[in-house]
Amino acid sequence: MPQLLNRPRAIEIMAREKLDGLAALMNHNVYYLSGYFGILMRTNFDQHSAAVLAADERQPRGLVTAAFDCRNIINANPPVENIVSYTDEPATPDRATSAGGAIYGGWGTRPDAALSPRQARWVQETARLTETTTQSCVHGLIKAIKDAGLEKARIGVDDERLLAWLPELGLTKATLVPAEGVFKEIRMVKTAPEIDLLRRAAKINEAALLKARAALREGVTWEELERLYMVEMAAHDARGVYLECGNGGLQSGKVAKHEPVMFDALGTYRGYHGDFGRSAVVGSPGPDIEARLTALEAGWRAAYETIRPGARYSTVAAAVFDAVKKSGFVGQFRPPVVHALGLQHTDDPAGRFDPPGKKPDRVIEADMVLNVDLPHIEIGWGAIHIEDTVRVTKDGCEALTSMDTALKVIG
C-alpha cells in the first residue's frame, strides 16, 4: 500500500496545535494515516476502522480493524507498525483475550488441507493479529492509543463522538480535542503517491464525462447520460459519485435542441476524487452561448496563470471574475469557487457550522491540488460549465485535466 501520509507536515501542524497525537475514526482519515483502504471503507458501516498517529516518530502508528478483515490486511501490508483487531463475538471466561475481546474463531481450515504459501501466511498471520482482540473498534482505538504512548497525552480526534466515547470506555487521563480541521490542514499539501492517485482520478473522471457527453441527443434523459458515466467509471476501477447538469436537472426535463447543457462529474479512484466540468449543446449553439463560453474560457486561463505558491484563493477568484467580465459576459456571473481536492470533494478546513460552499481564503502552497469551478446556470436559457484540476508547482501549476474547454456541438 502507498505511503499517503505527509508525516513531516503532520508533525509540524501537531506541534503548532500542541497535540501529541491524532486519532481517526472517519474512513478517509483512517485511510490517510494508515495507507489501508479496506472493503468496509466502501460501505456505510460506522465505527469499523480507526487509526492512531503519535507526534513522536518512535511510537508505533496504529490501525484498528475487524478480525475478519485480517486476510485483506495481510494482502495489503499497510505501512503501519501496530495492527489491533476486534471481534463482535461476546467474550466468555473461556474464550477471552488479554485485551478483553473474544478469541477469534474465523473461518476454519481443514487439518489435512495442503495450503499454498499465501494461504499458510493467512492462517499464521491471522492467528498472530488476533491474539489480543478487543471488544469493538473503539475499544481497539483505546488500545492503539495506549500502545502509542498516548494514554495521558493531548490527542486530536476527527469524530467528535470520540470526545464522549473514549472516556466512557476508560481513557480518562488523556486530553481530547476536536481536530477535524487539523486533519484537513495536514492533507492540504499532497505527497507524491497522493498526486499520482489524483492524476489518475482526474483522467478517468474526465474520460467518463466525455463519453457521456458524446451521447447527448435530443430527448435523452439525464438518467441515461449519468448511467453511461457510472458504467465508464466502473470499467476503470473507479466509482462515480454524480454527473450533474445543474441544480434542478435539465430545464426541459429532457435534452432539448439549442439549449446549452453543463456536465459536472465527480468520482473517486482509490478514495481520491476527480472533479471536472464541460459544456455541450445539440444543434446550433447561437452567438450568446459561444460568447458566454468564450468568457468562461478567459476566466479559466486567468486562473491557470494566477495559481502559484503565495497567491490566495481570493486572488485567483478575483482574476477569474475580472477576466470573465472583460470578455463581454452578458448577464449575472456568479463568482468562481476555488477549492482543494483530495480524499474529500473539498479538502479545505472549515468552521464547525460552515455550509459546504464556504471556503477559507487561504494562501496557496506547492503540491496542493485545486479545482476552479466556473458554472453559469440561467433558468430559461440553460447551463454551461468549465472546471479543471491543477497541482500547484513551485512556480505555477500543472493541469491534471485537459485544457480543451471548447463547447461540444452535436448534430
Image: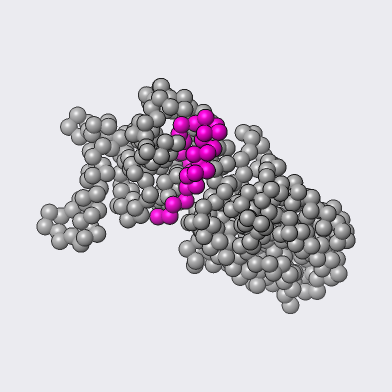
Q: Is residue 238 magenta?
A: no
Which quadrant does the C terminus fall into? Answer: bottom right
Residue 55 sits above or below residue 44 on the image: above
Please identify the quarter of the rendering in which residue 129 is found. Answer: top left
- Which residue occupies 57% across, 41% down? 185
- From the viewer's perspective, tell me whether residue 11 is left or right of residue 65: right
- Which residue occupies 62% across, 57% down? 393
The answer to whether residue 38 of the structure is visible from this angle is yes
Q: Position of residue 233 (x, y in %)?
A: 53, 64
Which residue sits furthest bottom?
A: 411
The residues colored magenta run: 1-29
Q: Nearer the viewer, residue 11 or 350?
A: 11
The answer to whether residue 383 of the structure is visible from this angle is no
Please identify the quarter of the rendering in which residue 300 is found. Answer: bottom right
Q: Nearer the viewer, residue 166 or 177?
A: 177
Q: Is residue 8 magenta?
A: yes
Which residue sits furthest top?
A: 173
Which quadrant does the N terminus fall into? Answer: bottom left
- Which residue occupies 79% across, 62% down? 298
Please identify the quarter of the rendering in which residue 221 is found. Answer: bottom right
State the colouring used for the structure image.
Answer: one colour
Which residue sits furthest front?
A: 395
- Which residue occupies 59% across, 68% down? 207
- From the viewer's perspective, tell me whether residue 181 is left or right of residue 306: left
Q: Position of residue 110 (x, y in %)?
A: 15, 55
Q: Nearer the viewer, residue 32 or 279?
A: 32
Q: Count of labels shown?
A: 0
Q: Position of residue 212 (x, y in %)?
A: 62, 68
